[in-house]
Amino acid sequence: MTAPNIRFLNRGNKKGEIWLYDQVGEGFFGGMSAKQFNEELNKLGQVDTINLRINSPGGSVFDGVAIYNALQRHPARLEVDVDGIAASIASVIAMAGDEIRIARNAQVMIHSAWGLCVGNAAEMKQMAEMLDHISDNIASIYAAKAGTEPAAWRDAMAAETWYSAEEAVAAGLADSVSKAEPDEDAAKAHHDLSIFTYAGRSAAP
């Protein structure tokens, strides 16, 4: 992690903060696994409000979905701040927020689920069906937040769609553009975006 994983903002008022400033998942992704995230979440104890700060290019879809579900189950109010980038599965994690704020120089990206498969045609067909199922699930998460139909989100995901702060709010992926001064270091998003079709909002149509 490039910043403290966790800190208490105000113990008396039971507020805590978790930073997700890394890739999601261990191994190939080399970032924070769902197990590690849950350990951080449990360290907060019985807090009333959690502030989740995100600057992540995404990573493992399964770790990301597990993190999303853990946040959904937690009884605390969840406030999400996208400080730099919430791309791929990190954008799904952000959707767990009761309130989602995005810094005015930050960005969000959504795309269809990816996967690797080595095997025969039947095994590759099975992989394709699984990826479609995962993408349908992710689209339903975006749709639930935005109040729109999942099919439209599948189209946006297939196109690998990047959103500026204002575009994310207009699309329903965030509630507001943060009024706080932007975090310039976070906004620079020191992540390798070359794996995507477009290397950031400025390069996307």
Image: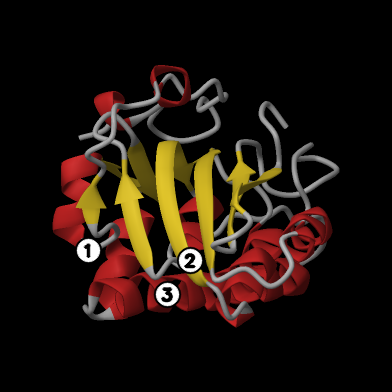
| Gap in angstroms between the C-alphas marked 1 and 2 | 17 Å
- Residue 140's place in the image compared with 80, above or below, is below
N-terminal of the pair, mark 1 or mark 2, is 2
Packing grade of label 1 (10 A; few <14, some 14-19, many >=20) is some
Q: Nearer the viewer, residue 44 or 58?
A: 44
Residues packed near mark 2 inside 10 Å, few (<14), some (14 to 19) or many (20 plus): many
**Residue identifier under label 2:** 78
Does 125 sit above or below residue 23? below
Disc 1 marks a residue whose amino acid type is Gly
Point out the tag, 2 or 3, that comes first from the N-terminus: 2
Which residue is depicted at the point 83% across and 60% down?
35
Image quadrant where one finds the N terminus: top right
The residue drawn where x is 28% and y is 29% is: 105
**How far, Cα to Cα, is label 2 from label 3?**
16 Å
The residue under label 3 is 141
Q: Please name the amino acid that badge 3 sits on.
A: Ile
Distance, label 1 to label 3, CA atoms, is 12 Å
Residue linked to disc 1: 172
Residue 148 figure quarter: bottom left
Quadrant showing the C terminus: top left
Percent coordinates x, y for residue 200 in the rendering: 37, 29
What residue do we see at 66% from left, 56% from top? 115
First in sequence: mark 1 vs mark 3:
3
- Give the image location of residue 10, x and y in percent: 57, 52
